[in-house]
Image (cartoon, rainbow, N blue to C red):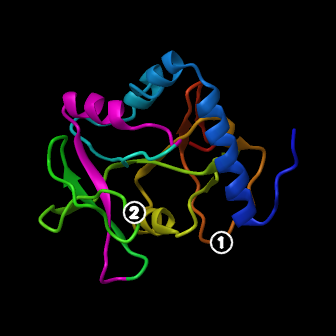
Amino acid sequence: MTELPTDRAALRTELRRRRKAQVAALPASVRNLSFRVLPSPVMALLPPGARIALYLSVGSEAPTGALIDFLHERGFKLCLPRIDPDVPGRMDFCAWAPGEPLTAGGPLRIPEPGPEAAVVDPDVFLTPMVGFDRQLNRIGNGAGYYDRMFERLPDRRRIGLAWSSQMVDALPVQPWDVPLHMVVTEQSVIERADG
């Protein structure tokens, strides 16, 4: 196995390269079947009607389009992230359902609910990532939005969505990093030993 860089920026670059290569190498049939539903061990953790935080996947991220429909059809309330343009570093989650409008995107140029959407606190996070390790530490895109949100709502379940190529033995952990409870890949469900 290739030795990973210890610099976090270089590590992100390498993990994105791995993710993109894995997705490009997958047959279309496998890509189309991945992340369409949540496995039963994950579904068992979701209270009926829970508010689920999701993201709109871009590029080679674990896709969320089918999951959004899957959860919505089962009566879960959904919310998407919105960057607060007036408070540096702050991300909120806003109520949203498939078919409702999205803006052209905030500072990150990712479609997000508009200013009319209500800010809500999710019960469960389904979160994107660049990589994760065996202890379920997560490395994101580097802006810290999710870590700050996890710090604000520490009792909420944090479940990562990732391709298997994004897993490494160990990540360099910063004091502000908040580990996940679980990660779902196209191959398995990985739970933290301490629950």
Residue 70, image x, y percentages: 29, 28
Residue 52 appears at what percent x and percent y?
A: 31, 45
Q: Which secondary structure, mark 1? A: loop
Q: Which residues are magenta?
A: 60-87
- Residue at image position (87%, 38%) is 1
Q: Looking at the picture, does residue 67 appear above or below residue 52?
A: above
Q: CA distance from mark 1 to mark 2?
A: 17 Å
Q: Earlier in the sequence, mark 1 or mark 2?
A: 2
Q: Which residue is mark 2?
A: 153
- Mark 2: which secondary structure? loop
Q: Which residue is mark 1?
A: 175
Residue 99: x and y, percent?
15, 42
> Residue 21 appears at what percent x and percent y?
67, 37
Query: Which residue is at 61% across, 44% downward?
Result: 194
Instruction: Decide which of 103, 64 is in the foreground and name it.
Output: 103
Answer with left or right where residue 192 lies relative to residue 120.
Answer: right
**Residue situated in front as seen by the camera: 177 or 130:** 130
Q: Residues within 10 Å of mark 1 (few under 14, many from 20)?
A: few
Dot 1 and dot 2 residues touching (CB under 8 Å): no
- Whether residue 36 is in magenta: the answer is no
Q: Quadrant of residue 149?
A: bottom left
Which amino acid type is marked by label 2? Leu
At 26% from the left and 31% from the top, the residue drawn is 69
**How many numbered discs?**
2
Quadrant for the C terminus in the image: top right
